[in-house]
């Protein structure tokens, strides 16, 4: 059987025989309880029976001189492995997810060339053979062996040991004496492990993960090669000083160490028990951590950081999020690039923060007590201050000439905007009492994105920055957009949500790709959009119930032009390229095939495909008003089911072929019926393949295909399609647009 393909073969009497010359056996989903008793596997090199039904492979001992790989992954009925004493060349055993496996045979000690032993998720396995030595074993995986409570196997060549989520409480000292080549040790979520107190020195160990060993109070693992140490969620009270002498440690994770109160300070020379001053060592050698780049204390109970933290020469990221007992910071190392203080109780930042010339990110989300210095480093590009209580002087941020993203603060206390940095690329104004945006904003040539949210007193937008790409306005009292917006040649996206006083849209720039106006209940006038929407374009007027008839006519009348122009330009099968939605109850007349329900049946001639005339279908739906339930955490989809068939469908041997495509995602409820128009540039690859497959059934005289469209919502409550229409679009050989008008609805 091929890899990954399950066998559905039923063998009531079991498999009777297999050839003894068999070298490679792969039978995923093998249905019998065991292999045939007559099978002699002397020539077998690979045995792979993933997700099989075997309870055991065979009885007794088999001679397996050639076997190199045994894979019984997810054979959930397997209870025992066979005697492997006659498998001297076996290199890989994978019995992961064999959830009924109870034992590993003692004969495993005779498998002298074993490199990989994978027992992951063998949840019934309680123990391993004690005190056995597998000299060649390099990788041993026991992750999620949730009943395993002891471990004493040794191997001097082991590089990776994974004991995550086991019940192991301690280790015999002999285990550590043979692990000089161990590089990776993972003991995550070993909730019975209380300590690693014997002096454990693993000279090659690079990564040690003790995350969520919830009762672990102390450890003394040392390694001059350690690069990553994760103590998150442990009960350690202090770090051994050996950690601070590690000059290769790159990442130290101390998240949620609730009992860790203090960090060890750099030791003082006079405190060292030495006989004479000549014996005193270089302190930089004693407390180096010269490679530490990432230090995380998130959620810990540390009350202070040592002043000597400034001496960590490589520290780039310091995470102190949710450190509720930390009130202040010492001077920080000049190499720091990322400082996270979210939801902490730090009252003030050190004055020296202005000297951190590499600092790029300062996160102070949800701060209530912070008093910040007026001077922050000029290197800072994106301070994050959302939900923070900050002083007004913060926003002037003296010297921040390189700032690219303005802090996301709530602006209720502000009545005017400060002068904005000249290199600003993004600016978001939220919940502000500001009435006016300064005219000088038009001079910010680097500005790409502007957002105004719930600024209920904001009634007017000035001329906007010349390189603006994205404009977002929500919950504001603006009545119009500036007429100069048509000159913004880079503007790709306009979003207008709940702007209840917005009455009209001016002429828009030709480059626009997306226009969304939702719940703008006073919006009446839309200029013609014929000069825009020339590539992938999306235009939505959700719940804009007061659009006048001329505006609605403009939107609908422009749609076929836009769709045809796009198809000529793009010819891509990934559509739809055009999506338009606005209030309305009737399908436009130019949709030649219409139905008063959610499905439609039509015929099209094969010559369209032979002559490459066909561009695709324009689709139109009338969607009924509905309100989305608050507990529906997704945007409901409207799906189009396409079915194609030869028109000679009286022959029952001729199949229907088809597939489902999402044509619309409804992000909010509709207060009334809405019209939705979209355009497929061509049949996508799967539909074209359907036509190729159907060609096997074509009659010589059959020159037409039958196509059925069915539109459905994600549930019965959201089957909201009231009407549908389809228009086939063609292009003549002269590349001149020609919308087929001869066909009539059936």
Image (cartoon, rainbow, N blue to C red):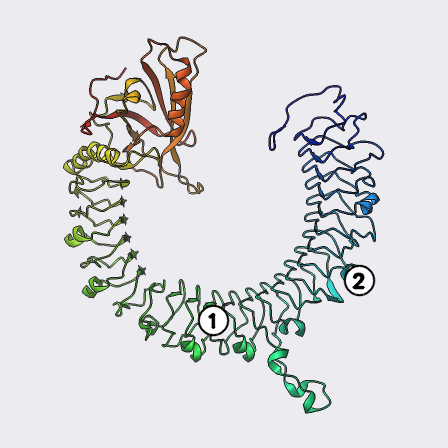
Which residue is labeled 2 in the image? 173
Q: Is residue 200 left or right of residue 437?
A: right
Residue 482 seen: no
Are there few (<14), some (14-19), or many (20+) residues within 10 Å of tag 1? many
> Which is nearer the N-term, disc 2 or disc 1?
2
At 44% across and 16% down in the image, what residue appears? 655
Q: Residues within 10 Å of mark 2 (few under 14, many from 20)?
A: few
- Name the image quarter holding residue 540: top left
Is 105 on the left or on the right of 333, as rendered?
right
**Residue 728 vertical placement versus 565 (above, below):** above
Q: Label 2's element? A: helix
Marks 1 and 2: in contact by CB < 8 Å?
A: no
Q: Is residue 245 above or below residue 28?
A: below
Q: Position of residue 281 (x, y in %)?
A: 66, 84
- Give how far across and how far down residue 262 sits, in percent: 61, 74
Residue 710 is labelled as none
The quarter in which the C terminus is drawn is top left
Q: Nearer the viewer, residue 156 or 247?
A: 156
Which is nearer the eye, 60 or 563?
60
Cα separation, mark 2 vs mark 1, equals 40 Å
| The disc label shown at residue 336, or none | 1
Q: Is residue 691 left or right of residue 730?
A: right
Using the rendered view, name the quadrant where residue 66 is placed: top right
Which percent across, then down, holds residue 135?
Answer: 78, 53
Give the side of residue 232 with respect to residue 595, left or right. right
Residue located at (41% from left, 67% from top): 360
Whole-percent x, y for residue 423 in the image: 29, 66
């Amino acid at each position: 059987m091929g890899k990954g393909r399950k066998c559905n073969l039923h063998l009531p009497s079991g498999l009777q025989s297999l050839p003894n010359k068999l070298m490679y056996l792969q039978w995923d989903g093998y249905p019998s309880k065991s292999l045939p008793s007559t099978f002699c596997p002397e020539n077998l090199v690979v045995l792979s029976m993933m997700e099989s039904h075997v309870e055991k492979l065979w009885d007794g001992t088999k001679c397996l001189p050639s076997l190199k790989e045994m894979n019984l992954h997810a054979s959930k009925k397997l209870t025992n492995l066979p005697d492997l004493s006659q498998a001297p060349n076996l290199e890989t055993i994978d019995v992961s997810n064999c959830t009924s496996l109870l034992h590993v045979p003692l004969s495993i000690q005779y498998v002298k060339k074993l490199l990989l032993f994978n027992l992951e998720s063998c949840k019934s396995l309680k123990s391993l053979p004690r005190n056995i030595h597998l000299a060649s074993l390099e990788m041993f995986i026991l992750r999620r062996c949730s009943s395993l409570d002891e471990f004493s196997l040794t191997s001097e060549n082991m590089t990776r040991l994974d004991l995550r989520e086991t019940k192991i409480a301690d280790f015999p000292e002999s285990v550590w004496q043979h692990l000089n080549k161990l590089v990776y040790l993972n003991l995550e979520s070993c909730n019975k492990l209380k300590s690693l107190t014997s002096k454990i020195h693993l000279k090659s160990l690079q990564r040690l993960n003790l995350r969520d060993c919830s009762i672990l109070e102390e450890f003394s693992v040392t390694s001059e090669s350690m690069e990553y140490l994760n103590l998150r969620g442990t009960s350690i009270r202090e770090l051994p000083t050996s950690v601070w002498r590690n000059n290769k440690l790159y990442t130290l994770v101390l998240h949620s160490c609730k009992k860790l109160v203090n960090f060890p300070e750099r030791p003082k020379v006079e405190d060292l028990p030495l006989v004479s001053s000549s014996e005193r060592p270089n302190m930089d050698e004693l407390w180096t951590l010269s490679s530490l780049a990432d230090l995380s204390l998130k959620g810990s109970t540390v009350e202070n950081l040592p002043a000597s933290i400034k001496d960590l020469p490589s520290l780039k990221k310091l995470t102190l999020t949710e450190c509720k007992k930390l009130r202040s910071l010492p001077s920080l190392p000049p190499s720091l690039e990322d400082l996270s203080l979210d939801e902490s109780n730090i009252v003030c930042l050190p004055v020296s923060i202005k000297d951190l010339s590499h600092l790029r990110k300062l996160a102070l989300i949800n701060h209530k007590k912070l008093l910040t210095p007026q001077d922050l480093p000029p290197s800072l590009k994106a301070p994050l201050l959302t939900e923070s209580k900050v002083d007004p002087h913060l926003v002037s941020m003296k010297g921040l000439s390189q700032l690219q993203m303005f802090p996301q603060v709530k602006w209720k206390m502000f009545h005017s905007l400060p002068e904005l940095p000249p290199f600003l690329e993004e600016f978001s104004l939220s919940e502000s009492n500001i009435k006016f945006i300064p005219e000088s904003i038009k001079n910010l040539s680097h500005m790409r994105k502007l957002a105004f949210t719930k600024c209920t007193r904001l009634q007017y937008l000035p001329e906007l920055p010349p390189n603006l790409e994205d404009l977002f306005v929500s919950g504001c009292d603006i009545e119009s957009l500036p007429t100069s917006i048509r000159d913004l040649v880079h503007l790709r996206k306009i979003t207008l949500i709940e702007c209840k006083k917005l009455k009209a849209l001016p002429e828009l720039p030709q480059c626009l790709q997306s226009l969304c106006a939702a719940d703008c209940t006073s919006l009446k006038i839309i200029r013609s959009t014929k000069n825009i929407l020339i590539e992938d374009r999306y235009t939505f007027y959700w719940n804009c119930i007061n659009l006048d008839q001329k505006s609605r006519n403009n939107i609908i009348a422009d749609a076929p032009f836009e769709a045809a122009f796009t198809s000529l330009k793009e010819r891509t099968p990934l559509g739809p390229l055009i999506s338009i939605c606005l209030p309305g109850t009737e399908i436009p007349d130019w949709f030649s095939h219409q139905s008063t329900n959610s499905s439609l049946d039509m015929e099209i001639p094969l010559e369209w495909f032979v002559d490459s005339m066909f561009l695709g279908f324009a689709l139109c739906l009338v969607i009924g008003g509905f309100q989305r339930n608050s507990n529906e955490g997704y945007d409901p989809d409207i799906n189009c089911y396409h079915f194609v068939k030869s028109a000679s469908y009286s022959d029952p041997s001729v199949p229907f072929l088809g597939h489902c495509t999402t044509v619309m995602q409804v992000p909010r409820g509709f207060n009334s019926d809405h019209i939705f128009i979209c355009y497929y540039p061509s049949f996508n690859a799967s539909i074209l393949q359907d036509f190729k497959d159907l060609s096997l059934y074509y009659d010589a005289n059959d020159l037409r295909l039958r196509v059925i469209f069915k539109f459905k919502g994600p549930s019965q409550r959201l089957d909201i399609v009231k009407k549908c229409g389809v228009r086939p679009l063609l292009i003549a050989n002269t590349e001149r647009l020609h919308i087929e008008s001869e066909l009539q609805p059936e």
